[in-house]
Amino acid sequence: MKGTSLKGAWKVATVMGIPIRVHFSWLIVFGLITWLLSSRYFPTVAPDLPIASYWMKGALAAVLLFVSVAFHELAHSYVAMKYRLSIESITLFIFGGVAQMKGEPPHPKAEFWIAIAGPASSFFLSGIFFILTMNSSGGARPLFAYLTQINLIIGVFNLIPGFPMDGGRVLRAAIWGRKKDYFYATQKASSIGRGIALFFIFFGLFSIFTGGMGGLWLMFIGWFLYTAAQASYQQATLQEVLSGIRVQDIMVREMETIDPSIPIDEAVDSYFLRYGYGGFPVIDDGKFLGIITLKEVKDVPREDWKKVKVSKVFVRHDKKWEISPDADAIKALELMIKEDKGRIAVTDKDRIIGLITRNGIARYVQIKGK
C-alpha cells in the first residue's frame, strides 16, 4: 500500500537503500498477536509443548509477520524503482504497511505492476511457508502453518478493490488504461473504495449486534480505508485543478513588506490587523531577510510588544523555502506541506518577486474546482 509517512515511527533497518520504520501502533499488534498465538492458537494445535515454547513461538510468529508485511511493501518498492520512482521509506503500523513513494506511476502498466507486486509477494511467501509446513514436524509445523494462512489472507485482502489498497490501484490502472485519464481513474477508484469502506463499517456494526467476532476490527479497517480513499479523491481533484498551473499564476505579486526595525505592536496594528494576512516578508534596504507570521508574534508576551522589534522574532529565510515562478503550483504546495509552512517565497535570480500561500492555493482550487 502506498501512502504518506507516519509520525511516531522509528527506523529499524535499511533494505535496498530504503529506510524501514516501525510505527508505535505496530507494537500493539505485536503484543496482541503474541498473546493470542501463545494463549490460544499454539496450545490448541500443539497441546504437548511447554508454556514457554508457546510464548517463544508466538513472539517469533509476530516477528515473521512483521517481516512478511515488510517484504510485501519492498515488493511494491522494487517494482516502483524499476519505473524510476523513488521510495523515501516504508513504515509498518497497526493496519499494515505504507511505502512512501515520490510521484505517481508514469502510465497504467506501471501502476498495475507496482500494485500487483505486493499481493504476489504475499502469495509467494504463503507458498514458501506451505512447503515448510509440509516438510516440518513438532512445534515448527503449526508456526509455519500460521504464516502460510496469514500471508494468504494478506494477499487476498489486499486484492479487494478498495482504493488505496492494492486491489483498488489495480482497478485504477484498468480505468486509467481504458479512459486515458489519470484523474478520472483516481476519482472513480476512490469513490468505489469509499463504498467498500462503508460496507466494512456497516458489516462490522452488524457483526457486533449479532455477536459476531471481529466486528469492531472491521469497523476500524473500514474507517481507515474510508479516510484514505477520501484523501486520495481530494488529492486527485486538487492535482487536476492545479494541472498545468504555475506558481506565477497564483502567487501574490503586490507584497506588503515589514521593516525589521519596527516594534511588534506597530507590525500588528499597521500590517496584520490592517491587511489581514497571516505573514509578511521582512525586507531591509531591499534585501529579503525572512518572514514574520502570527505564530512569532504570539510567542512574545503582549506586554513586550512595544519594546521587542521584528528583527528579534522573524524567521530568517532559508533557500529551501523558496521556489521559482515557473515551477508547478502543486510542487509549491508539496514544499509547503513538507516544510510545514503557510507561505514560501517566489524568487527569480535571488530576488523575491512574490509569495505563494496555502490559502491562496485553496482559494484558487475553490473557485476553479468542480
Image: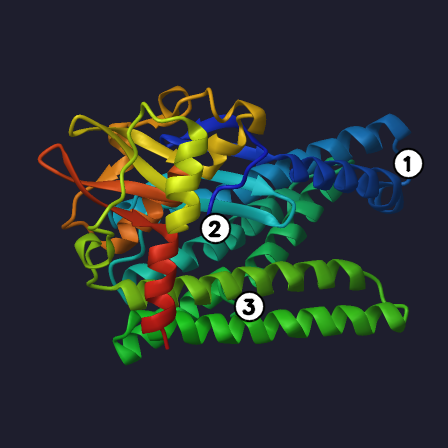
User: Position of 349 compared to 233: left or right?
Assistant: left
Q: Is residue 277 visible?
A: no
Sequence-first disc among 3 and 2: 2
The residue that label 1 is drawn on is: 48
Q: Can residue 364 be seen from the camera position used here?
A: yes
Task: Point out the tag, 1 or 3, that comes first from the N-terminus.
Answer: 1
Q: Position of residue 348 (x, y in %)?
A: 11, 40
Q: Which residue appears at 53% of the width and 70% of the height? A: 193
In the image shown, does 225 or 168 lie closer to the viewer?
225
Check disc 1: other Cα within 10 Å, few if <14, some if 14-19, many if 20+: few
Q: Could you say which is closer to the camera, residue 257 or residue 139?
A: 257
Task: Label 1: state its secondary structure.
Answer: loop
Kind of residue at disc 3: Ile
| Disc 3 packing (10 Å; few <14; some 14–19; many ≥20) | some
How many neighbours does mark 2 have within 10 angstroms: few (below 14), some (14-19), or many (20 or more)? many
In the picture, the quarter occupied by the C terminus is bottom left
Residue 346: x %, y % from top left: 21, 43
Which residue is at the front of the view, 223 or 50? 223
Q: Position of residue 134 (x, y in %)?
A: 65, 47
Q: Amino acid at mark 1?
A: Asp
> Would you identify the image quadrant in which residue 105 lies?
bottom left
Q: Which mark is drawn over residue 121?
A: 2
SS at badge 2: helix
Per the image, label 3 sits on a secondary structure element best described as loop
Q: Quadrant of residue 269?
A: top left
Residue at the disc numbered 3: 160
Q: Is 178 located above or below residue 245 in the figure?
A: below
Q: CA distance from mark 2 to mark 1?
A: 34 Å
Tell me which residue sits at (59%, 65%) in the image. 226
For discs 1 and 3, the disc positioned in front in the rendered view = 3
Which residue is pictured at 58% across the width and 76% down the height? 195
